[in-house]
Image (cartoon, rainbow, N blue to C red):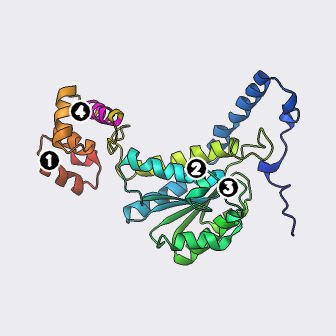
Amino acid sequence: MTQINLDRLTTERRNERTTHLDEMSIHEALAIMNQEDHQVPEAIALILPQIERVIQAVIVAFQQGGRLIYMGAGTSGRLGVLDAAECVPTFGVSADMVIGLIAGGQQAMTVAVEGAEDSTNLGAKDLAELNLSEKDVVLGIAASGRTPYVIGGLDYAQEIGATTASLSCNQDAEISQHAMYPIEVDAGPEFLTGSTRLKSGSAQKMILNMISTISMIGIGKVFGNLMVDVQPTNEKLVERSKRIIMQATDVSYEVASDYFEQADQEVKLAIVMILTDTSKEEAKEKLANAKGFIKETL
């Protein structure tokens, strides 16, 4: 078996501050872990231009009817699936607009699937089953920057003509060579050697938050700083929806509740009805003409 050289990977190096981790008190370990975590946003601040290029590409894809497809293995894959799932209730998009693929399929969300991440063919196969097109953006996520599943997927996406991006937690990552828009964030060695669910996972989570949230802002899913396409799928979200209507229009709770029901519980539609003093049908037309941007209806 060929030995895999991990020595050059920051994510695999030993952290000199924690070589005696097993001898520390709980407080000492907590303090150092917290200090290490502070390095994550600082590392991200250095690569904002890389993230910006990816977001610009995702907005273009969405405007053309394309999708954002995350793919990764282990923690990286789970974070992609999580971000994709949260876009549905937060921004009112369909479940196939932002998709998370994880090596080994849904069972890999909770149980490690042996060998799944080592197959380049599996990455291509998973994308092919989604009927990948040139309108889509594929973002490969791998803390190590060398996961075969991700590389296989990115190479297949390039062949199809889709836009490709990558997110790794090492500099000069291998997957960067397989993507049009690589992101490389280096927050230093992990608190627990090689445990990339820690700083690497935090960095990936924060960057995915940036990509999905700001891309959604770019297609009109936000008014001011309010998530006006939120889906009221439970009692808490129903109340939040009414509160958003109140904040956006300065009406009372009673008025917000009335328009919320008139608009068939569509927050954005209720806001436009109030701000433009129009019927539901007229407000729908205004929103359609404005491509979903509330400010363009005013």
Query: Which quadrant of the view contains residue 53?
Result: bottom right
- Disc 2 versus disc 3: distance between alpha carbons? 15 Å
CA neighbours of label 4 inside 10 A, class few (<14), some (14 to 19), many (20+): some
Amino acid, disc 2 = Leu
What residue is rendered at 73% in x and 30% in y?
Answer: 35
**Vertical comparison of 162 with 74: above or below:** below
What residue would you read off at disc 2? 79
Name which residue type carries label 1. Answer: Lys
Q: Earlier in the sequence, mark 2 or mark 3?
A: 2
Residue 201: percent from left, percent from top? 65, 45
Q: Earlier in the sequence, mark 2 or mark 1?
A: 2
How much space separates mark 2 and mark 1, taking CA atoms?
A: 38 Å
97 versus 196 height, above or below:
below
Q: Which residue is mark 3?
A: 112
Judging by the rendered image, the residue that carries numbered circle 1 is: 280
Q: Secondary structure at mark 2?
A: helix
Residue 32: give x, y in percent of width and height: 76, 29
Which residue sits at x=23%, y=33%?
249
- How far apart are the alpha carbons under marks 4 and 2? 35 Å
Could you tell me if residue 59 is visible in this image?
A: yes
